[in-house]
Image (cartoon, grey):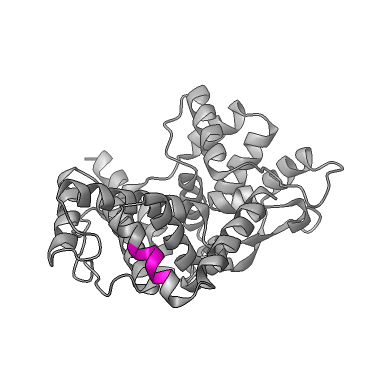
Amino acid sequence: MTLEVYRGDRLGAAQRWAELPGDELRRRGVTAARERDRATLWDLTVAHLMTLGREGAQVSPRTLRTYRVGAEHWLDYAGERAVAILRPARNAGPLFVRRLEARGLSPSTVRAYLAGARALYAALRWAGATDLDPFSDARAARDKTPAWEKRQPYEEHEVQALLGAGDARTRALVLLGAHGGLRVQEIVGLRWRDVNLEAGTARVLGKGRKVRTVNLSRSLVTALGVLGADVHPELFVVGATADAARRRLRLVCARAGVPYRGVHALRHYAGTRMVRAGLSLHDAARHLGHSSIETTQTYAKWADDSLKRALEGW
């Protein structure tokens, strides 16, 4: 309900921006940029994202937070370097990216912040405040670390330790990630109406508003059964927010003596375990809701420990 109200407020604000006469929209955009009015610039950016963005009104709070941080970093840089917001120099965008990289930020973080700065200028062009795009030629440096080495999955004994150290709700959270393969937003967004314990399935709303049916393991059905006695179908299974779920998992990791790798590493565990069990990449991709099997191939690399076993015998 809180998320729906939040989206409703954002959508109402976006509609008010979108319904402004062209001259007034331009005037407000120009004024906000010249005065470096960050609050108004951000409201304009959100209005553009919700009106014309790919995700529309379903743009996630996490995406908005990341974009806002990126836009803030750009405005900080522009202030330090005396960059005119509406008439930035030709190389201002690429130099901003180089500054982020020089600070030691990871390529993925640089790309995320760059996306936020680009979103700001897309909104300014939408408003007619400028026709420039200082980031048209800006590129973050290529990430040389293979995707499969960045975030390792939890090991089997670590998952078992987490299950033994948490309460009923935490066990459900862990198993929804480690067996169900759900993303953190999918976990906290799952309602009881979407769960069929008798059939052992759950209807999951995933990325891009895509719906998939997830088969539940026996232990996950049992864990959900402990929580699901006489609950209203509209209630959330785990509930709260993605950040709250991360805090919950971090606490149980500390209690169990397990290194915290994030909620998403539970999903990595699910994919890796499926491949090790002999399921095909297509099966794993369908279970996890991957749109491309190339993403699923990462789990094949984690699951293949033949080289490690060979070297241990040397």
Residue 24 appearing in the image: yes
Residue 303 appearing in the image: no
- Magenta residue check for 308: no
Q: Residue at x 14, y 57 (%)?
A: 95
Q: Quadrant of the C terminus?
A: top left
- Depicted 177 relative to depicted 10: above or below: above
* Lateral position of residue 275 relative to residue 138, left or right: right
The image shows residue 197 at horizontal and vertical percentages of 78, 52
Q: Which residues are magenta?
A: 25-30
The image shows residue 13 at horizontal and vertical percentages of 56, 61
Task: Considering the whole magenta stretch, tell me its main secondary structure.
Answer: helix
- Return the residue nearer the eye: 243 or 40: 40
Q: Residue at x 78, y 59 (%)?
A: 199
Q: Residue at x 18, y 43 (%)?
A: 103
- Depicted 42 relative to depicted 50: above or below: above
- Return the residue nearer the eye: 233 or 162: 233
Q: Splitting the image into 4 quarters, where does residue 201 fall?
A: bottom right
The image shows residue 119 at horizontal and vertical percentages of 36, 64
* Lateral position of residue 290 relative to residue 100, left or right: right
* Lateral position of residue 17 relative to residue 90, left or right: right
- Return the residue nearer the eye: 79 or 291: 79
* Lateral position of residue 232 relative to residue 247, left or right: right
- Depicted 136 relative to depicted 144: above or below: below
- Return the residue nearer the eye: 272 or 116: 116
